[in-house]
Amino acid sequence: MLYGDANKFTFMRSYFIVLLSLIVLHSASAQNIILKDTITNQAKDTVAITLDHLYDISDAFKDIARFVRRDTSKKVQRKPSGISILPNINYNPSIGFQMGAKIVGGLYLGERENTAMSTFATALSYTTRGIMVGYLAHDTYTSRNKWNIKGGIVIARMVALDYGMGMGHNIPTDIPEEEVLNNPARNRYVNQYTVYGFNERLYKQLSPGMFIGAGVFVELKRNIHTIGDFDTTPLNVYSTLTAYNPSRYNNNGLQFNWQYMTRDNPNSAYKGIYADIVLRMSQTWMGSEQASYQLQTDFRKYWPLSTDRPNHVLAFWHWGSYNVAGRLGYLDLPGTGRDTYARLGRGYTAGYFKGNSFFYSEVEYRFPLLRNQFLSGVVFANMQTADDRLGTTLFEKWQPAAGTGLRLLFNKATRTNLCIDYAVGRFGQRGLFLGLNEAF
């Protein structure tokens, strides 16, 4: 396989198949009881599904424990918690196999009828590629959504795969350095660096669902280098051409935001819209290496496909980052997996395609497999495009990917899913992607 040891992948695949089989077996046995009152008709074309009717991984573990103990006694049911404390186990081709601890949660700071769920996550993890990450992130909505505050901090030692700029388009050039940077053969380099990041944004509600805000970001990158012995690398070529320090630089500045949000849940939306437009302004007076301006767009739309199976959904995602003026540092160029949670571009490693400007779109069909929502599936397809320094413009060259996956309901109180995806792209790119919550 392209992404490392085939035996490791075979072991992981077998492990998850056995685990999934055990959990689904107990979910199915419990379903006979749970489904009795799963759907309650409230009106001619509407239904209500309560948390008691849903089945998540904690319920499965309880059933397994009772089965092992042969315990048939009735237990007092506790109210489901909005906080999940769990091993931070993850895998994708960019980071390798990840181990650590993670806490994710959600709560309402007002009435559910008029207040969006506030979410938070904190984690400490280590991966087989030598990445160490600690972070705290939050997305907070005050009562009646009058204010939205989101942001976080991160400290990480990163190891990032690098395939140069552009879309792998072979453009003749007489400049060897530009050939290295454009990298049409998609040779793989590995960059290592340490990052200290902080960002915080404050939004004020203007009308129901619409917000305007501003924020600040600080990103310090240190000890940047390419692992291995090379005469030249995309990192060094780009840094020389753009007058950036190849071993350390800062990217600090201000940002202005416009947001529109009507989706019903940030972890796994069944309906609604999420849109966010951000102007990021790196400022030398705030310590940035160079001044630059980047316009970012994020749009997500969810169409419910069933009135009695709410997790039967068609979803669309667009993410873009467009260079307005100036130049970003090499490690900050927009591209595959460069969104907040590194989820866009399943089918390729993070940073496989990148440029000064980048555009991405994805459509995903989500369908239930069990009525209690414990197990569901997805199929998805995506397209991405970027410019390069040799004349390829944005929207000129596209690269596709597609895949399918399973969803296990991890926490029914917050709609947190354990996501297991397999995706395939071009250039031999393919891989298994594990994570919590939907990609978008």
Image (cartoon, grey):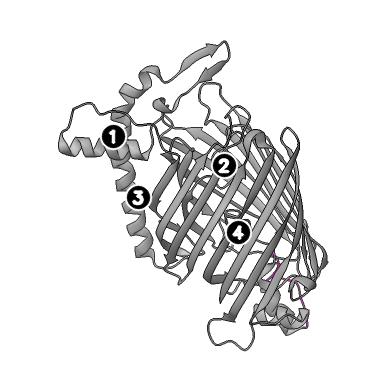
Residue with the mark numbered 4:
337
Magenta residues, start to end: 165-174
Q: Label 1: state its secondary structure.
A: helix
- How far is the residue under mark 3 from the one under mark 2? 31 Å
Going by the numbered disc 1, the residue's amino acid type is His
**Label tally:** 4
Left or right: where 102 falls relative to 328: left
Give percent across and percent down for residue 27.
32, 33
For label 2, count other residues whose C-alpha is less than 10 Å away and answer few (under 14), some (14-19) or many (20+): many
Q: Is residue 170 magenta?
A: yes
Magenta part, dominant SS:
loop
Q: Identity of the amino acid at label 2?
A: Ser
Give above or below for 234 relative to 399.
Answer: below
Distance from Cα at disc 1 to Cα at disc 4: 35 Å
Q: Is residue 153 above or below residue 75?
A: below
Q: How many angstroms separate mark 2 from mark 1 (CA)? A: 32 Å
Closer to the chain start, of discs 4 and 2, is 2
The answer to which of marks 3 and 2 sits earlier in the sequence is: 3
SS at circle 4? loop
Which labelled disc corresponds to residue 145?
none
First-in-chain label (4 vs 3): 3
Residue 245 lies in quadrant: bottom right
Alpha carbon distance from label 4 to label 3: 24 Å
The numbered dot on residue 16 is 3
Q: Amino acid at mark 3?
A: Phe
Near mark 4 (Cα within 10 A), the count class, few <14, some 14-19 or many ≥20, is: many
